[in-house]
Image (cartoon, rainbow, N blue to C red):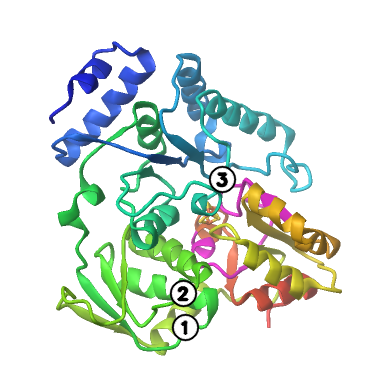
Amino acid sequence: MYLTNMEEKMLAGEEGYAVQKNMQILTALGDIFGAEKMIPVSSVQVAGVSYYNLGDAGLEYLETLAAKAARTRVKTTLNPAGMDLENWRELGIEEEFARKQERVIQAFVKMGVIPSCTCTPYLVGNEPARGDHIAWSESSAVTYANSILGAMTNREGGPSALAAAITGRTPAYGMHVEENRKPKVRVKVDTKLRGVPDFGALGYAVGKKIGPKIPLFEGIEDSPLEQLKSLCASIATYGGTALFYISDGTRADAPTETITITRTDIEAALRALNDEAAEVDFVALGCPHCTLEEIKTIADLLEGRKVTREFWICTARQTMQEAEQTGDAQRIRKAGAKFACDTCMAVAPLKGRFNVLATDSAKACYYGRGTNNFKTRIGSVEECVNAAVTGNWS
Ligand code: F3S
């Protein structure tokens, strides 16, 4: 791989141990994937933040890097951690876990990483421009950045994203190469989609049918951000897709391979995501993290009611603070529901605490089942709020 003079010096250790080690990671990756050169990145988003997933080995890696003077060179934000960094006790997190999680965050902060702890960095100030090369690692955010924002990023692992932050570079392969970003399958959506669960079901259905091939959707133009972020999360989870396009049917380079998604496909996907369970004991919304608009909807639905089940609203701390300005956060708390800022139902240590998760997110179903052994019920936000109040799924 071609390296500039400056990159050669980084690799030779002239900018210190941390830069050298991270340049070694990136050049090894570039060699594996056949990159011809490095490219500068303007933004990084690092996953692998929860101590639940990192363990002591990950914590030690991060603390060593921080101690060896690793520092970020570009705007770098964090994916959700394993707990709400302020209200972890209220969410039932153990003291020992909390102390380790705090050390993880401290190591990142020492390196210059902004502890935003969200999978929707684009909602809280890390929003790249069209054509920007970036290195993000949360899969739903990667798909959102490539598909909706028009930025260019591979799905980085936690260490390779951090390496990009510390060197300001990433190897130019995959989604950074225009040639690899062409749509491969035309997906005609021949049914009216109703809200977030339907968009999650669309991602599930298409992901299962075409895997990581790049789809060109027709029939979902003008969809709101909330529905698109659900689609990004779902199609990345069930198909491994890092990029899709949305067209009104007039695109000249539409692929010839075509599939059609009908109401039958959406219903089948929703059935596949729903387990048999008449009662729920955990309700979680905000996968990906809730927008201010979603928080308002939840607050409206909870007005004058009390929840009887553990109910988490997962969101970025900044978004929750904005909801405090509007009064929606207070209305939610009054009903007994809890904000889970900085974290989510998938990366918090929840195994064994609950049996049945109700959610509006297809991705949350995947991790609820796979990571935590929950049964899952997927439905509209209204159905989820009703379940939190009554404990029943109807
Ligand atoms: Fe975000 Fe957690 Fe879902 S990181 S996309 S809320 S699984």
Three-letter residue code for mark 3: Pro
Q: CA distance from mark 3 to mark 1?
A: 29 Å
The circle on residue 80 is: 3
Task: Answer whether labels 2 and 1 touch (C-beta < 8 Å).
Answer: yes
Considering the image in quadrants, where does the C terminus appear?
bottom right
**Residue 41: x and y, percent?**
33, 38
Indicate left or right for 67 with 212 as reference. right
The reply to whether the residue tagged 3 has its Cβ within 8 angstroms of ligand 1 is yes
- For badge 2, the amino acid type reads Phe
Left or right: 41 in relation to 377:
left
**Marks 3 and 1 in Cβ contact (< 8 Å):** no
Decide whether residue 274 is among the magenta residues.
no
Residue that mark 2 sits on: 199
Q: Is residue 39 visible?
A: yes
Q: Position of residue 343 (x, y in %)?
A: 61, 47
Q: Which residue is mark 1?
A: 193
Disc 3 + disc 2, Cβ < 8 Å: no
Residue 260 percent location from the top left of the image: 29, 84
Q: Residue at position x 33%, y 25% from top?
A: 22
Q: Earlier in the sequence, mark 3 or mark 1?
A: 3
Range of residues picked out in magenta: 338-366
The answer for how far apart the CA atoms under marks 3 and 2 are is: 23 Å
Tag 3 secondary structure = loop
For the point 41% across and 59% down, the residue is 144
Lower position in the chain sequence, tag 2 or tag 1: 1
